[in-house]
């Protein structure tokens, strides 16, 4: 869990679940659930099993299960996940690939 | 959205989390996983048991129960628990080292609250890995431009030869074909004829250096200020598609 005042200038990798409310200037890779809070800001690719975005992401998002863009989310990048929800109020610019055939 | 509560919210890097890079900001941080990079916080930093930091830690208060390979700089104090292990210098007004802790490095205590000047970048050998993984920084790698090899193949015999041919030919032409056999020489070197055709006025000077055709292209060398030096140094580098060397 990365608090709101925290900045990681580099990559974050985890086998468990991660919640980010701060900013990461690098990749975020998790094997579990990845929660990007409303104050979060990620400026690189993001991957996880279940990714929910409420903050801003400038990079591609990849999930093994699903990606949820919540209201207030701002995503500039492509999404690659078998399931995708985009809530009302989320801003999204990019491509979607829901066919996870490698 | 970023209320005070959020700003002061403490962060926890889970036991499975690995951070390759520097961590900075406000608030407290508990590190249970691994950080390869420097940690600079305006708050309390705790390295939990099992946590590992390869890099310097700077904060208001630093508590180490895990392992730190790097300097510890604290404005308030440093506490190293019994399970803590620190390999690096410690700078803090107050330092507590419990029995069982392992510490290797210099210790400076009882100083002013200001962090020392030497603590700006005390030990950051591990800040390098993220630099490699982040895309924008890879542009720093300067690709050395390929410099064309100096013309190992000396064109001296050829240029002299053809220059001599031209000189002879022009002498004949000036003489009004008196010598005879001028057709023979002209047919013998047809490629020297075409480029030199545009410049018959230059016959007064020995045209060997400038009017000599380039050995590879067969075209005439550029008509610059003709070097009067003895060997006709080629102005153009061979094999670099005519890139000039002198710019």
Image (cartoon, coloured by chain):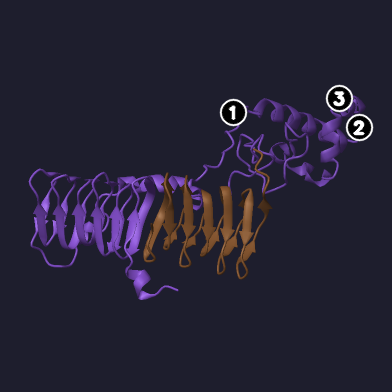
Q: CA distance from mark 3 to mark 2?
A: 16 Å
The circle drawn on residue B161 is none
Q: Which residue is mark 2?
A: B177
Chain B display color: purple
Residue plotted at (70% across, 30% down): B159
Residue plotted at (14% across, 50% down): B81
Q: Could you tell me residue B194's position as x and y percent?
A: 86, 37
Q: CA distance from mark 1 to mark 3?
A: 28 Å
State if disc 3 and disc 1 touch (CB < 8 Å). no
- In the image, residue B182 sits, relative to residue B79, either above or below, namely above
Q: Quadrant of residue A23?
A: bottom left
Q: Earlier in the sequence, mark 1 or mark 2?
A: 1
Q: Which residue is mark 3?
A: B188
Q: Nearer the viewer, residue B67 or B111?
A: B67
Chain A display color: brown
Q: Quadrant of the N terminus of chain B?
A: bottom left
Marked residue chain, label 2: B
The circle drawn on residue B152 is 1
């Amino acid at each position: 869990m990365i608090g709101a005042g925290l900045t990681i200038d580099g990559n974050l990798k985890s086998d468990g679940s991660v919640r980010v409310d701060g900013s990461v200037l690098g990749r975020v890779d998790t094997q579990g659930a990845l929660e990007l809070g409303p104050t979060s800001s990620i400026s690189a690719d993001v991957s996880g099993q279940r990714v929910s975005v409420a903050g801003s992401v400038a990079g591609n998002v990849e999930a093994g299960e699903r990606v949820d863009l919540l209201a207030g989310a701002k995503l500039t990048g492509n999404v690659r996940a078998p399931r995708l929800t985009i809530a009302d109020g989320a801003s999204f610019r990019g491509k979607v690939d829901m066919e996870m055939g490698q | 959205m970023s209320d005070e509560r959020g700003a002061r919210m403490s962060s926890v890097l889970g036991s499975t989390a690995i951070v390759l890079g520097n961590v900075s900001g406000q608030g407290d941080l508990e590190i249970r996983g691994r950080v390869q990079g420097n940690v600079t916080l305006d708050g309390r930093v705790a390295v939990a048991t099992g946590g590992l930091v390869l890099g310097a830690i700077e904060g208001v208060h630093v508590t180490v129960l895990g392992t730190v390979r790097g300097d510890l700089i604290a404005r308030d104090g440093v506490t190293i628990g019994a399970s803590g292990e620190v390999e690096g210098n410690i700078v803090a007004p107050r330092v507590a080292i419990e029995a069982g802790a392992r510490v290797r490095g210099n210790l400076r205590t009882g100083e002013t609250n200001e962090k020392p000047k030497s603590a700006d970048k005390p030990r950051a050998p591990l800040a390098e890995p993220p630099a490699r993984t982040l895309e924008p920084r890879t542009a720093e790698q300067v690709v050395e431009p390929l410099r064309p090899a100096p013309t190992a193949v000396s064109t001296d015999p050829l240029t002299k030869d053809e220059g001599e041919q031209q000189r002879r030919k022009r002498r004949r032409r000036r003489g009004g074909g008196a010598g005879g056999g001028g057709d023979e020489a002209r047919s013998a070197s047809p490629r020297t004829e075409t480029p030199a055709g545009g410049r018959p006025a230059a016959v007064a000077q020995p045209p060997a250096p400038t009017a000599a055709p380039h050995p590879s292209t067969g075209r005439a060398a550029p008509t610059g200020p003709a070097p009067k030096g003895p060997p006709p140094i080629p102005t153009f580098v061979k094999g670099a598609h005519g890139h000039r060397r002198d710019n």
